[in-house]
Amino acid sequence: MSTSAQAPPIPSPQFDSPALTPTQWRTFFALTSTVIPPTTTVSSDPALIRYAASAASADNADFRKGAEMLFETRLPADAKKRLATVLDLLNSKPGSLLLTGSMKPFHEQPLEVREGILKWWLSPASYLPFPPARAFAVGVMQLTKMLWLRRVTEDLYPAIGYDNGVGRAPEILQGEERGFYDQWNFVQINEPTELEADVVIVGSGCGGAVAAKIIAEAGFRVIVVEKGTWVPANQLPLSDVDATEQLFEGGLTATTEDGSVGIMAGSTFGGGGVVNWSASLRTPHYVRQEWAEKHNLPFFLTPDFDRHLNNVWTRMGVQTPTTHNNRNQAVLSGSQKLGYNACVVPQNASPEHQDPRCSNGCGCPPGARKTGTVHTYLPDASRAGARFITSFQCKTLLFSKENSNQVIGIQGVYGRTETEVIIKAREVVVSAGTINTPALLINSGLKSPHIGANLHIHPAIVMYATYSHPRDPIVGSGLTTLVQSFDNLDNRGHGVRLEAPIMNPGIILGTFPWCSGQQFKDDIACFQNMDSYIGIVRDEATGRVVVDEAGRPRLHYSPGAKERQWALTGVEAIAKIALVEGAEKIFAPIQGFPPFVRTGECKLGVLDPGFQAWLSEVRKVGLQGPGAMFGSAHQMGSCRMGATPRDGVVDENGRVWGVEGVSVADASVLPSAAGVNPMVTVMAVAEHVAEGVVERLRKAPPARL
């Protein structure tokens, strides 16, 4: 379609932003415009002509503004400092010699030379005098792709045929349901305030929403605080850029500290239940058995846990989908051809729900919507009298002056007015999620060595395939199928499951592999002929959540050697599915690694010599280096449940060991990785924890707060 346009050295950008110095910005944009340069095209289509000319450069106002915002509001200070150091090196002759092999500063090199340097940095076979350059290249590449795909939408969307679908909620939400949305008991705060409740719940996601319903319906006064905001259904789905900023943790820019894994976590009123892909899977028996026997938590094998799972399925309206979009159908039919064990994934939505953009919030009408937290548990809690405070940053737990082990509430800041708020309560339930719950406990002075430890994240790889015919990527529900043939590769319940995700460009395409600027833009332009697939690993390796000097959570995690090998098994299996389904190109999740390109009919199927040679190269390169791209949508275990204080942060009922008056009800209490999309598991555990809170409140006389 296109070829890389010749480009002169990069001049100093004509704008002033304090995030970087002018020379650092110049070098930064020299890098980003190498990742996504202007290209030329033989097409006469105005949309493709504009797309080809678009670049991730300082001249592109949308991209520049996105970069400024990222540096000023999202990038941690130490990460920005590390990046600035490398930018300074690239701007100097000695640094350029070390990093590029040339005395000429990076920005003075022409485009083709800069692209060659990037490829050299990315190649696993290349010798680098400064090895950190490889991880630096991957980081800049991911950042560039992410910003360009989300910010330069007027150039991108017409070229790839994406209509964005913003605010498509039907008129019914403007009419008969409007009164319902007006009935949320949101608390507005304009001055320093002290409130009281029987229970304050920190977080409104899958754990907090369930806890709020159970406790409020038992007749107790409940206040739920949430650091995110509520987005009315008639504004949904949001655009990709607005969704990332308003619905996801860190604006969907968060990564592990080494940059090896991108983190996707909900951060809005309703939490992950608003942005997940509707998969409603029960906890596998082998996982329940592991938790009961290895972790000495027999509750997980009891009929009581079955009851909680059943309650969640009933309230969430879980049903089995009867139709599948093209990529989910490919999972089923390709697996059948290959002898893989594939199945249909139950969803918390009716079969009429065919919205492919639900990660941006579901705006579908009743009867066809995703029945997430904002349509089930949170309205139940509201009708029972629960109150809600959004834009609330919980800073610390409050302790009794008479008893330093007794929690009596929380202290935080109401973000809309920057007002300090104290909420006194008989019980505190922390449901801030696997990332933020340990941070709150640490910032509150709790000392258990298990707080933040045992972090599991289900590291996942994303693969792409393009076909000679349209695949309708923005049609139908996402994630309605999965392959289970590889989920027990070590005979201890660890392995990889294969699924088909949503395909919103600004959410998913940042993981598309880069081999050159021309290749990346040409392949992205084939979006309408594209499928994506994911492999989700049940990880045995663990990481840790820590807090920085400002008290913000940071994730220390890198997939272990076994996890990377299990993921590689998934790469091979996905590639075979795509091949037997007729894919023309198949892309491995490795930056700089060329795709498989079908050159004939492949009559031998997966035994085709060209395909086998490509697979052999994939295995040889592997997923061990920084070029391997991982993501995570499931974080668990950072405040794990343990039979004793020596084993975990909370007991079998979710109560924090060594402290009275505080429980945890979210994914952080899971003893190890759930092995499946954990929503149903988390909600079942939260119901159990909440019932324990209700029982204690009924037995204990009201305390003076």
Image (tube, rainbow, N blue to C red):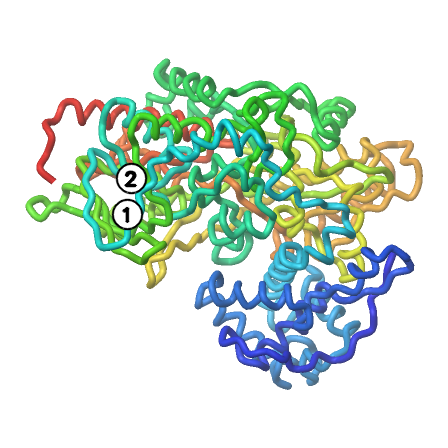
Q: Secondary structure at mark 1?
A: helix
Q: Is residue 119 above or below residue 588?
A: below
Task: Tell me the quadrant of the picture where the N terminus can be found.
Answer: bottom right
Q: Nearer the viewer, residue 658 or 229?
A: 229
Residue 554 picture location, percent across and down = 41, 55
Q: Nearer the viewer, residue 472 or 170?
A: 170
Say whether marks 1 and 2 touch (CB < 8 Å).
Answer: yes
Q: Is 323 displayed left or right of 599 in the figure?
A: left
Q: Is residue 624 above or below residue 428?
A: below
Q: Nearer the viewer, residue 384 or 77?
A: 384
**Which corner quadrant of the image does residue 355 belong to?**
top right
Residue tagged 2: 649
**Which corner quadrant of the image does residue 653 belong to?**
top left
Report crowding for label 1: few under 14, some 14 to 19, many 20 or more residues within 10 A (C-alpha). Answer: many
Q: Residue at x 60, y 48 (%)?
A: 240
Cα distance in 3D space between marks 1 and 2:
10 Å
Q: Residue at x 24, y 55 (%)?
A: 191
Q: Amino acid at mark 1?
A: Leu
Q: Residue at x 87, y 40 (%)?
A: 468
Q: Secondary structure at mark 2?
A: loop
Residue 583 picture location, percent across and down = 82, 38
Residue 666 picture location, percent across and down = 37, 36
Residue tagged 1: 441
Q: Nearer the viewer, residue 331 or 525?
A: 525
Q: Is 302 displayed left or right of 656 in the figure?
A: right
Q: Is residue 684 visible?
A: yes
Q: Amino acid at mark 2?
A: Val
Q: Residue at x 83, y 40 (%)?
A: 467
Report crowding for label 2: few under 14, some 14 to 19, many 20 or more residues within 10 A (C-alpha). Answer: many
**Which corner quadrant of the image does residue 692 belong to?**
top left
Residue 636 picture location, percent across and down = 43, 39
